[in-house]
Image: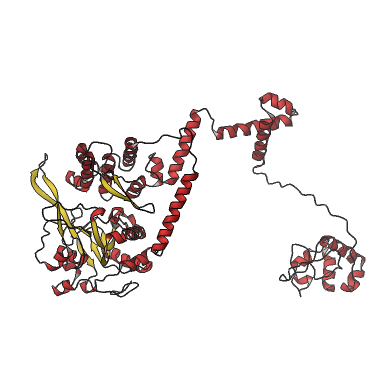
Amino acid sequence: MTPLNTVVGGKASTCAPHLIVSGLRFAHEVGPLDFARILHPKGGTGQVAFGGPVATRKVDAKGHAVMTWTNRRWSPHALATRSSVDIAGARFITMATYRYHERGQPKPKKSEANIVGIGSNWVDLDSYKEEAWRDVPPSVIREVILNVCEDLGLPVPTLINFSGRGHLVVWQYQAQAWALIAPRWKAVQKTLHERFLFLGSDRSGKSPTKWFRLPGTRNERSGQQVGMVWPPVLADVQRTTFDRLAAAVLPHARQTKAERLAAEAETAAKRLASLANRKPRVGLHGAKLGGRSYWDTISTDLEKLFALRFGTGPIPDGEGRNTWCLMLAYAASWRMPAKDLAGYIREQAARCGLEEHEAIAKTVTVVQHAGEAAQGIKKIWVDRRGPVPVERKVDPRYRPSPAHFVEELGIKPREMKKADLRMLVDKARQKANAKERVTKSRRAAGVGSRDVSQDTRREVGRVALEMRAEGLKNREVLQVFGIEQRYLDTCLCDARVVADIGSTAKPTKVVKVSPAAAPVVEPEACDVIESPALADAFEGTHEVLRGTRESGDQSVDVLVADSATAYSAVVTMVGTSLHRGRTPAESPPARRAFSCPAPVLATVEACA
């Protein structure tokens, strides 16, 4: 494990000296305000948001108190210097800071557009959702987290917070301007999430606007108390820097400004060139979904997936209740009037396994944006895809892509096929759906299946072969089937291929050997050459070696005889090897080169 007070790539520094001065020494003593001071030390800009559900005096039809969400804002300077900071009722805190607002003015919305600065990256680990880690004690989970950081070369975490069921792992650094590091920050968050997926990293926890529980509060689902659990001693709390963290996490080095501008200019030039060379297509090429039909199709896919996973509901705990409620609200905000959206969310709360006030609290911004869209309000969106950023006025409602639905809900390829999803699919399933649509249209146009036509050809070829075997002429076979000669040739070819399947017979090759002159045998090669029997044996041997040549590869210690050279006992036939300095008796390939009886071979070996 990485030792305490060390950071990969640089020296660590203590980040909470005021806690030690105030008398706090251990992590379990940290309360909500102390935790906020650790996350947002003095020197940061903007305001920290504190929130939580609070009961009002109103009562709903079931007799339950109507809940509202508190939203208090305090600057990092006020958190560090004031002793009377009021965060009563707050159970959650944000990692990012938001722009200031004047007294009496509405608070800026908790959105990326209003983020001023951020001083940490994190992963939200729900290990209880993973079957392999469900029954593992939290202390072991924390040990695994630290070991993974060491194995991946990541800086040691600043702190680990136990949320009652999962863990929040935080890497803290000096607060950075959000506008300057937003793309790199998101890349770091995405990579950290992917590295810790095996421990149940929460997809929704990647967002910079995410709420996180404060130590000292209690998790209403598990009943356990939330608390800071690592490092045990506050003197060991340490920071890194954003550049060090990004260099350790991201797989690629950071581009310079000149390199980035050159890459953007090259991409823009390629896009313009492709548009200039594109030829307009003539005719109708498939139906195009409009705004209503697009979101209707996504809603249909969501209902199919819900029925496949959970039937009629409710969603079990730990299976993404909040995410499902949010995804259903996203699609519904484009399909129904804004005044009916809140009622729809209340109806879906029971299916998702949530209370009505919980469902409303999770989708409050979706309802707000739908109301703004109904009033005709537009928001400014900066398009940075080109070389020059362009500002556009767009609909304020959330517009998540199908890929976002797939990622958030964790839709698997087998679920895409089994539920017959049309929009919430990956690239592979998208191609398969397109193939099915083309096949369906071809069948409707009267085009037969390729499998049927192949079976027909094989059957016609089989019967034609039998007719030919019985003596029918080719002309008579064509008259029987009423087909052309070209089609019959194709049928016969397919039938022959099928008939040859499983056959082990190989065609024999006829090797033509040109007559060659009788070999010249030197008498001193072997004294036994005078024997007529040995002469016949050597003659057969030279018949084997006939047609070979000397090898030109000097690295191979093998001699190959040439038909024009005299016989030598250290030369072997083609396809075998005989090292220099070895006798034919010591080399089995050399013995195989002789084509004479065994007694004669023994006499030759004795001679050698």
In the picture provided, is 588 more to the left or to the right than 434?
Answer: right
Numbered circles on residues, count: 0
| Residue 370 quadrant | top left
Question: 396 or 185: which is nearer to us?
Answer: 396
On-image quarter of the N terminus: bottom left
In percent of width and height, residue 314 lies at 25, 43
In the picture provided, is 552 more to the left or to the right than 441?
Answer: right
Q: Is residue 137 visible?
A: no
Question: 595 or 20: which is nearer to us?
Answer: 20
Identity of the residue drawn at 24% across and 52% down: 111
| Residue 223 quadrant | bottom left
In percent of width and height, residue 513 lies at 84, 54
Question: 400 or 277: which is nearer to us?
Answer: 277
Identity of the residue drawn at 50% across and 31% down: 442
In percent of width and height, residue 71 lies at 15, 54
What colour-coding does the image apply?
Answer: secondary structure
Instruction: Examine the rendered structure and indicate whether residue 13 appears above or below residue 283.
Output: below
In the picture provided, is 60 more to the left or to the right than 589?
Answer: left
Instruction: Examine the rendered structure and indicate whether residue 387 appears above or below residue 11.
Output: above
| Residue 342 quadrant | top left
In percent of width and height, residue 93 lies at 19, 58
Q: Is residue 308 visible?
A: yes
On-image quarter of the C terminus: bottom right
Question: 381 or 162: which is nearer to us?
Answer: 381
